[in-house]
Image (cartoon, rainbow, N blue to C red):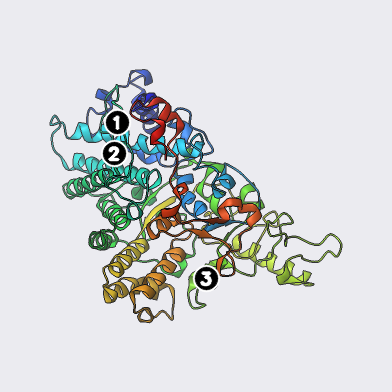
């Protein structure tokens, strides 16, 4: 690709491997590690795979030349989807790690930004690692074994995951553009220096490669050892269920409804829906029954103040959290039935305690000493009592500001701490929603209702899916269920592109966001009319890649 990708191979064969197995260093100096050593046998190949697992959530400077600690890879990229799409709402101007800049759409629209550059190179780093494993496992020199097939299945799945992320961020949405001609991203298959630079493939070509990789992954997994059972760490390993889940996501994003529905059913088979207690536990552990895939964050690789829960939770002990409580769109929360236990994690009546709140209704009036929050007008006692009650429930203190419609869906396991927690990437609930959407789009109303029924009836004691008996009503309800069930888990950006929906914080009574704080991102035209939904290609890539020119910029 370009020089940075060449450097990545050296980093990958050195830094990544040494971070995965200290014993390897006892006999092999860091600067002497080669592709031959790194891929000599299945055990060594597993070290490369372990590096990919850790690279998903490690701080970017540990795996990318020029990386920065403020972007701890999927700690950042996963919640970015809800930050960009306006689902995860900031209540104050407190900034950290560029999180407010992202929310205002001033980062992914800038080709020199860290976000555009680091997401690009992180995903291509995954492609590089996958290529190393795929090319070695399929060159005909290794004996076939279940262990080798398991490694190969994970490598194909990783490559598909990386290319899906790249094409969904750096190209026009499949369903709103012309995938046969729209420029996608470069497809790279090399694992040897020097890399051959490639031009942008079309969106269709990228999707075709993703599909082929997932077919190959599933075939390899069927001959593999299977993912080990055990604790949260085992779900860091990809398996056939993850491959089916990615196939379901890919098919949904391109309108291949039948494949999406079938793959979603296969992906979720071994992951029963969570009950109320698990659902309210904070979404901080791979041990939850629904989790198909997630990163188990180990102490040695914790991201501290760059972590997922620092960016999205209201219980992590950091200034971004204490000064800027994250709230949910009040239009979504108000629509949740009282019989649905998911409503319990959104606190409509939390007092606005922040004197710097963007809506100018926080804190106490300097003249009267009474709350500025109109929900507690002349009621200082009620204001203080409710704040104390919420503090007690969630293990926080008055050092943490509160705000109406703040959430406690996503919370770190040890409230008020900076301890590391897992990052969940795929749950069975998503698969029920994919099946329902796909069947609705195929005009199979009864099938879509039955797909949605288990999830709805688990969450809402009065749920009646038959109330949604037309395609239009059912699709609106499925969208509502996705926004609610997957809130804060990063799906908002790709959902809006697939549905071709814009952002309007002012519509239907308002979301609760501040126009002064959100600036031009307060209202954003839908993706088919606004190319700012597409991430800019890093300027460094265009400058260095001979097969890309300024005309290739999004």
Q: Give SS at disc 2.
A: loop
> Is residue 318 something that shows in the picture?
no
Give the quarter of the figure containing the N terminus: top left
Contact flag, marks 2 and 3 (Cβ < 8 Å): no
Question: Which x, y percent locates residue 181?
Answer: 29, 44
Q: Dot 1 lies on which element?
A: loop
Q: Is residue 157 left or right of residue 78?
A: left
First in residue order: circle 1 vs circle 3 = 1
Marks 1 and 3, how far apart at CA: 49 Å
Determine the CA span between mark 1 and mark 2: 8 Å
Q: Is residue 33 left or right of residue 69?
A: left
Q: Residue 194's quadrant in the figure? A: top left
Label 3 SS: helix
Asked if the residues shown at circle 1 and circle 2 are in contact, with their CB atoms under 8 angstroms apart, the answer is yes
Label 2 or label 3, whichever comes before in sequence order: 2
Residue highlighted by disc 3: 343
Instruction: Name the residue located 57 percent from the left edge and 42 percent from the top edge.
Output: 98
Of the pair 192 and 283, the residue shown nearer to us:
192
Label 2: which residue?
Answer: 201
Percent across and percent down for residue 244 are: 26, 54
Q: Which mark is residue 198?
A: 1
The mark total stands at: 3
Q: Nearer the viewer, residue 469 or 500?
A: 500
- Position of the C terminus, as image quadrant, is top left
Q: Residue 527: x percent and y percent?
A: 43, 54
Q: Nearer the viewer, mark 1 or mark 3?
A: 1
Residue 383 higher or lower than 425, as above or below: below
Q: Does 92 sit above or below residue 543?
A: below
Q: Quadrant of residue 255?
A: bottom left
């Amino acid at each position: 690709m370009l020089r940075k990708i060449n450097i990545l191979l050296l980093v990958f064969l050195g830094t990544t491997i040494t971070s995965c197995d200290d014993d390897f260093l006892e006999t092999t100096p860091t600067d002497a590690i080669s592709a031959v050593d790194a891929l000599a046998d299945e055990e060594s190949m597993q070290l490369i795979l372990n590096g990919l697992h850790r690279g998903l959530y490690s701080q970017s400077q540990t795996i990318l030349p020029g990386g920065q600690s403020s972007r701890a890879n999927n700690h950042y990229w996963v919640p970015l989807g809800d930050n960009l799409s306006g689902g995860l709402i900031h209540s104050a101007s407190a900034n950290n790690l560029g999180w407010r800049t992202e929310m205002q759409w001033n980062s992914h629209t800038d080709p020199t930004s860290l976000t555009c550059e680091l997401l690009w190179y992180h995903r291509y780093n995954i492609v590089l690692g996958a290529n190393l494993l795929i090319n070695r496992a399929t060159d005909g020199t290794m004996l076939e074994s279940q262990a080798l097939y398991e490694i190969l299945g994970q490598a194909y799945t990783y490559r598909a995951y990386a290319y899906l992320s790249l094409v969904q961020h750096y190209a026009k949405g499949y369903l709103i553009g012309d995938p046969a001609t729209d420029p996608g991203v470069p497809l790279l298959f090399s694992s040897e220096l020097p890399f051959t630079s490639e031009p942008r493939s079309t969106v269709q070509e990228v999707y075709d490669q993703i599909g082929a990789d997932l077919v190959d992954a599933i075939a390899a997994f069927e001959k593999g050892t299977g993912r080990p059972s055990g604790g949260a760490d085992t779900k860091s390993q990809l398996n056939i269920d993850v491959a089916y889940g990615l196939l379901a996501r890919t098919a949904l994003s391109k309108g291949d409804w039948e494949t999406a529905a079938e793959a979603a059913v296969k992906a979720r088979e071994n992951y029963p829906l969570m009950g109320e207690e698990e659902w309210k536990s904070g979404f901080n552990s791979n041990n939850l029954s629904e989790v198909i895939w997630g990163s188990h964050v180990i102490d040695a690789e914790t991201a501290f103040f760059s972590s997922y829960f620092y960016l999205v939770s209201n219980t992590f002990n950091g200034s971004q959290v204490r000064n800027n409580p994250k709230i949910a769109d009040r239009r979504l929360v108000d629509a949740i039935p009282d019989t649905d236990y998911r409503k319990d994690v959104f606190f409509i009546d939390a007092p606005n305690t922040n004197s710097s709140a963007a809506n100018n209704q926080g804190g106490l009036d300097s003249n009267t000493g009474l709350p500025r929050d109109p929900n507690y007008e002349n009621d200082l006692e009620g204001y203080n009592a409710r704040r104390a009650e919420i503090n007690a429930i969630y293990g926080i203190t008055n050092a943490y500001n509160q705000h109406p419609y703040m959430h406690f869906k996503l919370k770190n396991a040890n409230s008020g701490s900076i301890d590391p927690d897992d990052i969940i990437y795929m749950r069975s609930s998503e698969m029920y929603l994919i099946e329902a959407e796909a069947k609705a789009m195929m005009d199979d109303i009864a099938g879509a209702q039955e797909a949605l029924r288990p999830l709805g009836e688990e969450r809402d004691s009065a749920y009646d899916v038959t109330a949604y008996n037309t395609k239009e009503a059912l699709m609106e309800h499925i969208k509502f269920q996705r926004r609610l069930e997957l809130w804060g888990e990063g799906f908002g950006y790709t959902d809006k592109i697939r549905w071709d929906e814009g952002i309007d914080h002012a519509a239907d009574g308002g979301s609760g966001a501040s126009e002064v704080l959100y600036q031009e991102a307060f209202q954003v035209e839908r993706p088919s009319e606004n190319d700012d939904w597409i991430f800019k290609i890093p300027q460094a890539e265009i400058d260095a890649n001979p097969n890309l020119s300024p005309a290739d910029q999004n």
